[in-house]
Image (cartoon, rainbow, N blue to C red):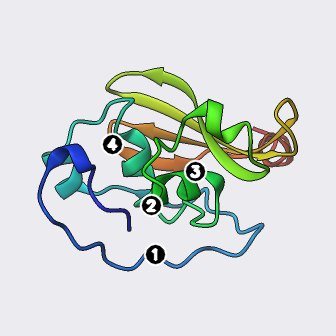
Amino acid sequence: MATPPVAAGGNFEAPPPPPMQPPGTDMTGICFRDQLWLNTYPLDRNLVFDYFALSPFYDWTCNNEQLRMRSIHPLDLSQLSKMTGMEYMLSEVMEPHLFVIRKQKRDSAEKVTPMLAYYILDGSIYQAPQLCNVFAARV
């Protein structure tokens, strides 16, 4: 798990991250919520990524984590655009109730391929279903 934000103060030791799910694992049936974190920190655009990083949806090998380890904001597009590989972007925000995070593969500064979407609704994190699965279910 990620440590609480530096601005919150204190000296916290982070527990080990939750096990990463194998690629292709359908996690649409999982809901993650950390009420203790939500009671301690505001859920806003500045801290939402720290909260998302606590969830089993977070890929600890992503570019955002490399930025966090260098004390750079994990959603800093000027830094992410210089990297290649998996990354997360905050794509929609309706503070404080709804945040949409997109997982994408960056091949160059201009070329990204959307992979998955996650949404945080009133503090609960979900993986959005993929469009092909929605059509397959004939909803």
Percent coordinates x, y for residue 8 in the rendering:
16, 46
Crowd rating for badge 4 (residues with CA inside 10 Å; few <14, some 14–19, many 20+): many
| Tag nearer the camera, 2 or 4 | 2
Cα separation between marks 1 and 4: 18 Å
Residue 18 placed where, x, y %? Answer: 46, 75
Crowdedness of circle 1 by 10 Å Cα count: few (<14), some, many (20+)? Answer: some
For the residues labelled 1 and 4, say whether their Cβ atoms are less than 8 Å apart. no
Q: Which residue is mark 3?
A: 64
What's under tag 2, amino acid-wise? Ser
Instruction: Identify the residue position indicated by label 4 in the image.
Output: 123
The residue at 23%/73% (across/down) is 13
* Residue highlighted by disc 2: 55
Residue furthest front as drawn? 70
As measured in the structure, the alpha-carbon distance from the residue carrying label 2 to the one carrying label 1 is: 7 Å
Identify the mark nearer the N-term, 3 or 1.
Answer: 1
Query: Mark 1 or mark 2, which is nearer the start of the sequence?
Result: 1
Q: In whole angstroms, how far apart are the C-alphas of marks 3 and 1?
A: 17 Å
Marking on residue 18 = 1
Element assignment for label 1: loop
Disc 3 residue crowd, few under 14, some 14–19, many 20+, Cα 10 Å: many
Asked if labels 1 and 2 touch by Cβ distance under 8 angstroms, the answer is yes
Question: Which quadrant of the rendered structure holds the N terminus?
Answer: bottom left
- Dividing the image into 4 quarters, which one contains the C terminus? top right
Which amino acid does the dot numbered 1 rest on? Pro
10 Å crowding of disc 2: few (<14), some (14-19), many (20+): many
Q: Amino acid at mark 3?
A: Asn
Among numbered discs 1 and 4, the one appearing first in the sequence: 1
